[in-house]
Image (cartoon, rainbow, N blue to C red):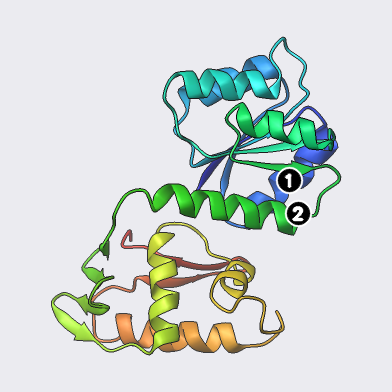
Amino acid sequence: MKILLVEDNLQVAGFLRKGLEEAGHVVDFADNGRDGTFLAMGGAYDAIILDRMLPGGVDGLGIVAALRATGSKVPVLILSALDAVDERIRGLKAGGDDYVVKPFAFGEVLARLEVLIRRSQSDVLETTLRVGDLCVDLLSRRVTRAGKAISLKPREFKLLEYMMRHANQVVTRTMLLENIWEYHFDPQTNVIDVHVSKLRQKIDAGFESSLLRTVRNSGYMLSADT
């Protein structure tokens, strides 16, 4: 996913940017309201993380207001040290979709961000996912590749659906652990590798090209690009 981060505290911004990129997101960054507004208005972002108090003549709420005035529905997660209830209400009424108070845990920010993105994507009814000649029908839960039916167990289907929704992106073990196994397993367990290996055998074995690849020291990627 492509994320815009607008934060004037360079230490906080560096921490967030590193974590988001490790989670497989592409991050654009601005450290002031003027540049943040320019990027927000001109870029096609899946979500925006926005500080409330910014230098540059435009604060976070000003950026949100400008976005909403154009009809943009991009999810906006507001970060702020202003923790009073009234301030949080102001942020949400200005057009923010969620509000996280500083100091924060990165895991919570990432989880809230992914919820906002999923919610925004669900506005578009999607019943079929395709990557190359691999097709998943979400209604019938039928999986085919090059017209050949592939039988998957429930966990394998959930894993494939997640990979297809993140096609051409690096999906980390942590992302899979959080979204497929919901923290029920130790991150050091090999259950992820075992399931990915079984899924790879089912969707790639016997076909001319491999779709599911291991990205060394990073995770996995589902892609039809050679």
Labels 2 and 1: the sequence-earlier one? 1
Please state which of residues 70 and 45 is positioned toward the viewer in this rendering: 70
Q: Position of residue 118 (x, y in %)?
A: 48, 54
Mark yes or no: residue 22 visible. Answer: no
Q: Secondary structure at mark 2?
A: helix
Q: Residue furthest top?
A: 57
Which disc is residue 16 wearing? 1
Name the residue rendered at 71%, 19% in the picture.
59
Name the residue rendered at 49%, 86% in the picture.
195
Q: Position of residue 175 (x, y in %)?
A: 59, 66
Q: Position of residue 142 (x, y in %)?
A: 23, 79
Indicate the quadrant where residue 136 lies. Answer: bottom left
Name the residue rendered at 47%, 18% in the picture.
69
Q: Is residue 216 left or right of residue 160?
A: right
Which disc is residue 99 wearing? none
Indicate the quadrant where residue 206 lies. Answer: bottom left
The amino acid type, in three-letter code, at marker 1 is Leu
Neighbour class for label 2 at 10 Å: few (<14), some, many (≥20)? few
The residue where tag 2 is placed is 106
Q: Secondary structure at mark 1?
A: helix
Q: Are marks 2 and 1 in contact (CB under 8 Å)?
A: yes
Whether 84 is drawn above or below 113: the answer is above
Whether 26 is drawn above or below 148: the answer is above
Neighbour class for label 1 at 10 Å: few (<14), some, many (≥20)? some
Q: Is residue 108 left or right of residue 192?
A: right
Cα separation between marks 2 and 1:
7 Å
Whether 218 is drawn above or below 45: the answer is below
